Amino acid sequence: MDQLTIAGEQRVLPDPPMPAATPVYDVVLVTWLLTALSTLCLALVMTGSSLPAYVFVACWIPFTVYHARGLTKALFKSPTIWAYPVLALISTLWSQAAAGTFRGAIELAVTFAFAIIAALYLPPRKLISATLCGLSVVAVVALSVRGFVVDPLTGSVDFVGPFQSKNQLAFFIALLWLTSLAILVDARQHWLFRSLGALSFIASGPLLILARSATSDVTSVAALLVLLINLGFSRLTRTARAIAAFAVTVILLPGIVLLAMLGSELQQDSLALLGKDTTLTGRTVLWERAFELIPEHPWLGQGYHGFWREGYIEAESLWEMFGVHGGFHFHDTLIETTIETGYVGAAILVFFVLSVAFHTLSWSWREKSAEASYFFAIVFLLLVRALVEVDIPSEFSLATFVIVIAAQYSFTYTARSAPVPAAPLRSGNATPQTIEQRDQRGRDHLLGTNSR
C-alpha cells in the first residue's frame, strides 16, 4: 500500500484493483478438444476396455485443477443435478457390494462433474460441433472393426463393430444422426462442420440399418422429427403456437382412438414389423422377475450397482437364463433404478429427467435456436429409450454425459428472464451484443470471472 501525506497527516491509500486474469491459453478451444475426445472415449468405454475411461479422466483433471478456484461454486449451483449421484454414494451404507457401489458412485459423480465443466466453458453451438467430430470418429472406428456376435435368444448374427451389443452401436449412430441434423439446420455453424454434418447425416441412415436395432430405428426417426418440429414451433408467435397445437390435437385424436380400438391385434402386427416376439426378446421375463424383487427392498433398493454381482443367486440365475455372464441390466431405466436405489432413487431420477425436459423445452422456445431444440430432442430420445434400455444414470456413459450437459445449459439459460445478463448499451457507440458475447458473459457470471 502507498502512503500519502496531507496537511502533515499520513493516510494509507488502498491498493489499486488487480487486472482481470488473462488465460494463458484459448479456454474455449481446449474445452472443445476435451469434449470431442470425451465423446470418443465415452463411446469406446462400451467396448469393454477400461483405457478410454482412464483417458477421459486424465484429460479433464489438469483442466479442472487449473480452473479449480472458479469451479468451486459453479459446479454446485444446480443442486437438482447432484441429487442422484449423492444418493448413489449414500447407498454404499446398505449395499451388499459396498466396494462396487462406492466406486461406481464416485465414477458417476466424476462423469457428472466433467459434463458440467464442459457446459460451463463451452457455448452450446461449439459443444455440438465437438460432439459431431467425436461421434464421426466413433462411426469410422465401428466400420473399421468388423465385429459380429450371435444373439443367444434369437440365434441371429448381429454386426456390433467394436462394441458389445448392436443396441450400443445403434445408440451412438442415432446420436450421430441427430447431431448431424442439428448442425445442418444451424446456419451459424462453420461451413466445415456443416460439410461434415452433411456427410454424417447421409451415412447415419445406412449405418443404423446395418446395426439392425428396431428400437433405435424408431426412436431415432422420432427424435429427428422432434428436433425439426420443435424448432419450427418455437419460431411461431404465441397465437400461431396455440392454433398449431389445436390442429395437431384434432388430427391426432382420431388416430389415438383408432389405436385403442385395434388393441392387441395392432400390437401383434407392430411386434412382427419390428422383428420382436411377444416377450420383446426376453424383456418381459426380466420385468416380471424385477417386479417380484422390488418389494424386498422397496424404498432404497439394493444399492447402486448392488444387484448385478457375482455370487448373488438372483443375478446368477438371470445370467444363466439369458446365456450371459457379467454385466446385463433389466432393459428398462425405471425398473433398473428402482432395483438399485428403490422408489426414492426412481423418483429422484424421474424428477431430474422431466425437469431437464421442461427446461430444455422452455429454453428452446425462448431462444428459438437449433442448439436448444437439439438438446430437447436428446432428452426426448433418452426418455423414449428408457422404456426398453438403460442409458442413464451410468458412470463413464456418453448418454449420462450428454444429459447432464443439457441439464446445465437448460437450468442456466432458464434461471433468468434473459438467457445471460446483458451489459447496458451506451448512447453514441452502442452496439448490440451477439449471442456468443452473451454466452461469454453468462459463463463469467457463473464462474465469478471477468473476461473483459
Image: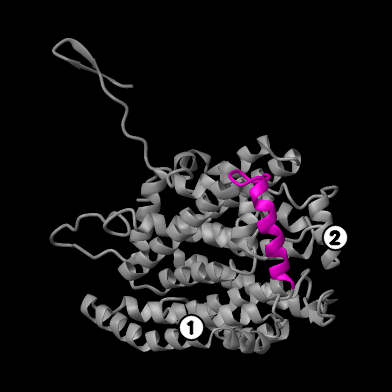
Image-based side of 164 in relation to 232, left or right: right
Res. 363 mark: none
- Label 1 crowding class (10 Å Cα cut-off): few <14, some 14-19, many 20+? few
Q: Residue at x 43, y 85 (%)?
A: 257
**Which residue is labeled 1 in the image?**
260
Q: Which residues are magenta?
A: 282-303
Quadrant of res 64: top right
Quadrant of res 275: bottom right
Can you give x and y, in whole percent of width and height, for residue 450 in the image? 37, 46
Can you give x and y, in whole percent of width and height, for residue 254 in the image? 39, 88
Res. 325 mark: 2
Using the image, determine if residue 95 lies above or below residue 373: above
User: In the image, what residue type sits under mark 1?
Assistant: Ala
Q: Residue at x 43, y 57 (%)?
A: 355
Element at label 1: helix
Question: Is residue 59 in view?
Answer: no
